[in-house]
């Protein structure tokens, strides 16, 4: 029996619905199991979108059918593998880096589904989640001409008991040896994915990035930013590194425009252009 018909439109529509649900759930003020549900929906959104991209080029999204069994569609890892093997990523998206980002979240999802994650790992995946939404928006827009931004508002009210960590430097780990091992194992998985991407020349800004509330890229993370403190005396808080804006953003608008125009050709960028982009 031939493989069943698959609607590309329904795959894309369901993918967008899953991603929008993930963003909505993550931004709820009261939500238990927030990180786990968000990551599950995001990975599901990517799996559906990747299957749609494969079908768009008439490639199969099913495993080889065995006699007496029903057709089984491929999972997220195989979908990513087929995208990379057939060079199907749009030029606007670094496939290797996006693959590392999605796999990092898939690793977190698998741990949550089959058992549970150590307390506090949500802080580790947060930069991956932030970048993932932007990666997804660029991918779906390039492949299917669907803009995620048209279906959501960016006017969010940034309230919280604690500000997000600028970079994950230290994290308290439960004194229990098994919990320490679990956290270290998860961090090592993330660092391995990031190291492989960096070694292959991938765009690290597509893997994990910290953004401020204006969605301006503040820091491209590398695996060196993921460091775990396993000291039994850790006080249970994530260390937040404060930065001096005069050091991180040393140029005035006039100086910035001058430096940009020195590096480009064509019409000079003006202060009006700068304000329009902002």
Image (tube, helix red, strand yellow):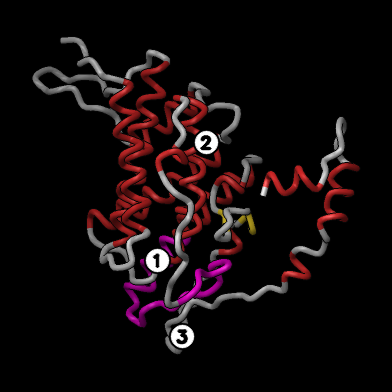
* Sequence-first disc among 2 and 3: 2
Give the foreground label among 2 and 3.
2
Instruction: Give SS at disc 2.
Output: helix
> Relative to 230, is 81 above or below?
above
Identify which residue is drawn at 51% across, 49% down: 131
* Sequence-first disc among 3 and 1: 1
Q: Give how far across and how far down residue 45 sits, in percent.
A: 34, 39
Judge by depth and name the residue closer to the eye, 276 or 113. 276
Task: Tell me, yes or no, whether the two marked residues, 1 and 2, touch with CB atoms within 8 Å.
Answer: no
CA distance for labels 2 and 3: 40 Å
Q: Look at the image and tell me in which quarter the N terminus lies.
A: top left
Give the foreground label among 1 and 2.
2
Q: Give how far across and how far down residue 213 sits, in percent.
A: 55, 60
Mark 2 = which residue? 138
Q: Give how far across and how far down residue 14 sits, in percent.
A: 29, 34
Identify which residue is drawn at 41% across, 60% down: 186
Q: Quadrant of residue 28?
A: bottom left
Instruction: Give SS at disc 1.
Output: loop
Identify which residue is drawn at 87% across, 38% down: 268
* Sequence-first disc among 1 and 2: 1
Residue positioned most to the top: 1
Residue positioned most to the bottom: 233
> Relative to 171, is 226 above or below?
above
Judge by depth and name the residue closer to the eye, 112 or 245. 245
Q: Is residue 20 left or right of residue 277?
A: left
Residue positioned most to the front: 272
Q: Is residue 175 magenta?
A: yes
Q: Is residue 257 left or right of residue 177?
A: right
Q: Is residue 222 left or right of residue 261?
A: left
Q: Give how far across and how far down residue 19 sits, in percent.
A: 36, 43
Mark 3 = which residue? 234
What is the magenta range?
162-187
């Amino acid at each position: 029996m031939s493989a069943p018909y698959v609607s590309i439109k329904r795959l894309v529509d369901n993918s967008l619905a899953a991603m929008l649900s993930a963003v909505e759930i993550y931004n709820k003020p009261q939500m238990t199991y927030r990180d786990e549900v968000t990551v599950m929906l995001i990975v599901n959104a990517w799996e559906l979108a990747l299957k749609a991209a494969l079908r768009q080029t008439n490639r199969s999204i099913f495993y080889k059918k065995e006699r007496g069994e029903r057709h089984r569609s491929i999972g997220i890892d195989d979908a990513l593998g087929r995208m990379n093997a057939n060079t199907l990523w749009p030029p606007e998206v670094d496939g290797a880096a996006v693959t590392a980002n999605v796999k990092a979240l898939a690793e977190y999802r698998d741990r949550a589904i089959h058992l549970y994650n150590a307390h506090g790992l949500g802080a580790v995946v947060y930069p991956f989640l932030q970048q993932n939404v932007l990666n997804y928006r660029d991918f779906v827009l390039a492949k299917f001409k669907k803009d995620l931004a048209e279906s959501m508002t960016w006017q969010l009210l940034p309230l919280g008991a604690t500000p997000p960590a600028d970079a994950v430097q230290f994290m308290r780990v439960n004194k229990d040896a098994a919990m320490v091992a679990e956290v270290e194992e998860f961090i090592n998985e993330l660092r391995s994915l990031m190291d492989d991407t960096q070694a292959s020349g991938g765009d690290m800004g597509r893997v994990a990035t910290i953004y401020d509330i204006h969605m301006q890229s503040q820091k491209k993370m590398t695996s060196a930013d993921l460091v775990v403190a396993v000291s039994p005396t850790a006080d249970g808080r994530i260390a937040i590194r404060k930065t001096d804006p005069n050091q991180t953003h040393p140029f005035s608008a006039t100086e910035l425009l001058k430096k940009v125009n020195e590096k480009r050709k064509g019409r000079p960028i003006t202060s009006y252009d700068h304000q329009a982009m902002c």
